[in-house]
Amino acid sequence: MTPEIFLSLLAATVQSGTPILYATLGEILTEKGGILNLGVEGIMLVGALAAFLTALHTGSPTLAFAAGGLAGALLAAVHGVVCIWFLGNQIVSGLALTILGAGLSGFFGTPYIGRTAPGFDKFSLPLLGDIPILGPVFFQQDALVYVSFLLPPLMWAFFRYTRWGLAVTASGECPAAGRAAGLNMAAYRWGSLLGGGVLVGFGGAYLSLAYTHLWTNGLTSGRGWIAVALVIFAFWRPQRAVIGAYLFGGVMAFQLRLQAMGTAVPSSILLMLPYVLTVAALAFSSRRSRRTAAPAALGVNVEPSE
């Protein structure tokens, strides 16, 4: 493998891992608030379709990206109505959300299969793009990749240093303590759920606006489920989510390169690689100590008035 091909593979790793990173950060935000959302795949699909249709009809990728986040928040709100207002089962609601999102995107997206829409193109950041090795890999990407670089440290600071972040953490760890402090735990759960929905919707929007620039049904190809697994792999820490997202992005980019090179390995085997890695990551995570456990109140409902 020549240096040029290797650098190209690394750049593709960053691009392929970006939608997974958006979705993983969104699910971390949601779960830190105590809400288990297994509807990430469906939210990504709806976000991708909303962004694509907005770009197609308005010609504005920026507006389309915002539309993808809004669509993600709206679908996440359905989960909130079931689980926060009516105290429904979070696992069942999340699975139903995935089916709903897949159905909506398939029904409304089928007429647009194969069509292209305006999106985000790659450009080199001044000075940074000229750095050897790092420049071509990290700083000759599209604008949405650059935005994703900022999100993990911002989310880490949000949870560690802000009042809202600490309150969200309390709603996921010990709602009783938050109530004792006079906080409305249901309100903070709503905030974490909707904010997480926006980020997951952004992940879907990235796929249709920057990764492919076109629409096809099932565009996410299981990336939502990978994001759910990565939350466990990252131990609910935004900074670790970066490692996991790029690791999975690298596997996806590598298997695509192998298929393009006409390798003798069957394509079905290559397509399995990301999911084999998912199982391995979960097995690794399960062997870690108890200090890496999920938020203590994850999946536990609280009364809407609390």
Image (spheres, rainbow, N blue to C red):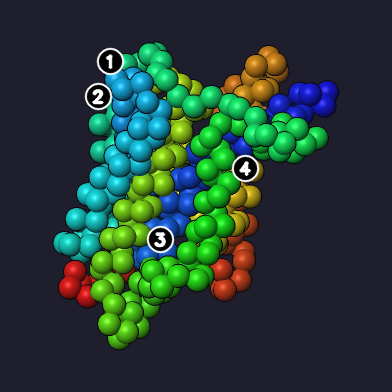
Secondary structure found at label 4 = helix
Q: On screen, 106 above or below 177?
A: above
Q: Earlier in the sequence, mark 2 or mark 3?
A: 3
In which quadrant of the rendered view does residue 142 lie?
A: top right
What amino acid is labelled 2 in the image? Phe
Secondary structure found at label 1 = helix
Quadrant the C terminus occupies: bottom left
Q: Earlier in the sequence, mark 4 or mark 1?
A: 1
Provide residue 194's location: percent of width, then percent of height.
31, 53
Provide residue 78's location: percent of width, then percent of height.
22, 49
Secondary structure found at label 2 = helix
Q: Calculate the distance from the C-alpha at mark 2 to the C-alpha at mark 3.
A: 30 Å
What amino acid is labelled 1 in the image? Pro
Q: Which of marks 4 and 2 is nearer the N terminus?
A: 2
Q: Earlier in the sequence, mark 1 or mark 3?
A: 3
Asked if marks 1 and 2 touch (Cβ < 8 Å), the reply is yes
Give left or right: position of 206 versus 123: left
Q: Would you call the spot at circle 2 few (<14 residues within 10 Å), some (14-19), or many (20 or more)?
A: some
Q: Name the residue under label 1.
A: 111
Asked if marks 4 and 3 touch (Cβ < 8 Å), the reply is no
Provide residue 138's location: percent of width, then percent of height.
67, 37
In which quadrant of the rendered view does residue 287 lie?
A: bottom right
Q: On screen, 175 above or below 270?
A: below
What amino acid is labelled 4 in the image? Tyr
Quadrant the N terminus occupies: top right
* Marker disc for residue 108: 2
